[in-house]
Image (cartoon, helix red, strand yellow):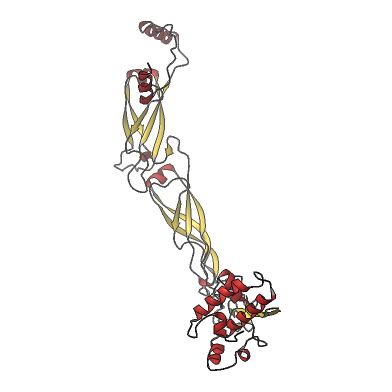
Amino acid sequence: MTQDPYEILGVSRDASADEIKKAYRKLARQLHPDVNPDPETQDRFKDVSRAYEVLSDAGKRQAYDRGGDAFSQGFGGAGQGFSFTDIMDAFFGGGAGGGGAQRGPRSRARRGQDALIRLDATLAEAAFGVTREIKVDTALTCEACSGEGTAPGTSPTTCETCHGQGEVAVVQRSFLGEIRTLRPCAACRGFGSVIPDPCRECSGDGRVRTRRTLTVKIPAGVDHGTRVQLTGQGEVGPGGGPAGDLYVEIHVAPHKTFTRHGNDLHTTISLPMTAAALGTQLTLPLLEADVASADSETSTTFDLEVKAGTQSGTEQVIRGFGVPSLRGGRGDLVVSISVDTPTRLDPRQEELLRELAAIRGEETPDGQVEAPHTSMFGRLRNAFQG
């Protein structure tokens, strides 16, 4: 079999590093012992791995292109080996155990977590908007070290274990040869540096917890459970990293008069049967009354006309007096009429009601049963069916 690594991988001599890696991945997926366990395939897999070891290393490839012996340049040479990461790349397309995680030291500065707090509001505050001050307990950048985590006058030093790489190599022997894997350095936790003298205020974290006051503007039209996002007002990240976001969740308290359904407000008013029969005019309080000041010109009431003969359960819709929408416009106010029937009558009231019943011929009502509501389609169908 040919000993030319280019021919083994099936690439040209001017192939790029990406082309070489792609060719190796393709062959490794086909020839790996877990896929094809027969001895001949295992031998070929070893040749492919050795060829990739030469061509994936810039120095070895250059030496081979100048006429050097492939075997002496690492084709299975002792102490060299190939990276286990490359095998994992062939099957999973990423770094070993990390899905393509970036190699090298990781930064101490990381984004902080988001925070969530609850804000209690009245129905009127949620409907028309409100500006409130809230107290928040979150992590802020340590002023003593400006987020660096080091004591004043000191700085991090390079880790002696990994020499600033943030990773250490672990070599194991297998039937494939030496397999080298990279793991985060335990001495520096993958940072590549250590803090010999941590800041006393934050113990090296770069942040401290404190209480602060924020001004929150709640827009008009929010509902129960709505979350208002305050960008960059959450937890400051370790190592002076950027802050997360703060979410303010609105909890709307029940109202004694109005109930919200979407952007509409619903309320019920009770009328004596005489007012419902004769008709009347009522002064209805609006939700604006909860937030309007004494010198405000905003109308806080509405004159509602109740027609004579209004039945219990009748609804009257007042356009544009509901809750403002977050997208513009405003909902309606729906007023339900409840007719009260007197339960206690004095002799004179009873006498007058009996006289009225006699005049209307209602002394012995037969209690007619009403037919269920029939749609227009149903009435047409019944007409055709006779």
Q: Please tell me how many numbered marks the rendered image carries.
A: 0
Q: Is residue 340 left or right of residue 51?
A: left
**Residue 179 at x, y = what percent?**
66, 79
Q: Residue at left 43%, top 6%?
A: 364
Q: Residue at left 47%, top 54%?
A: 248
Position of the N terminus by quadrant: bottom right
Instruction: Please tell me whether residue 177 is drawn above or below residue 385 in the rendered image.
Output: below
The residue most toward the bottom is 67
Q: Is residue 141 left or right of residue 381?
A: right
Q: Quarter-wise, where is residue 368 in the image?
A: top left
Q: Is residue 264 left or right of residue 13?
A: left
Q: Residue at left 51%, top 60%?
A: 114
223 or 203, which lies in front?
223
Q: Quarter-wise, where is residue 163 in the image?
A: bottom right
Residue 361 appears in the picture as rendered = yes
The residue most toward the left is 297
Position of the C terminus by quadrant: top left
Residue 196 appears in the picture as rendered = no
Instruction: Please tell me whether residue 349 is drawn above or below residue 88 in the rendered image.
Output: above
169 or 188, which lies in front?
169
Q: Is residue 109 left or right of residue 313?
A: right
352 or 170, which lies in front?
170
The residue most toward the front is 1
**Residue 184 at x, y = what percent?**
62, 75
Instruction: Please tell me whether residue 320 is drawn above or below residue 245 in the rendered image.
Output: above
Q: Quarter-wise, where is residue 361 in the image?
A: top left
**Residue 312 at x, y = what percent?**
41, 22
**Residue 202 at x, y = what percent?**
57, 71
Instruction: Please tell me whether residue 294 is drawn above or below residue 190 in the rendered image.
Output: above
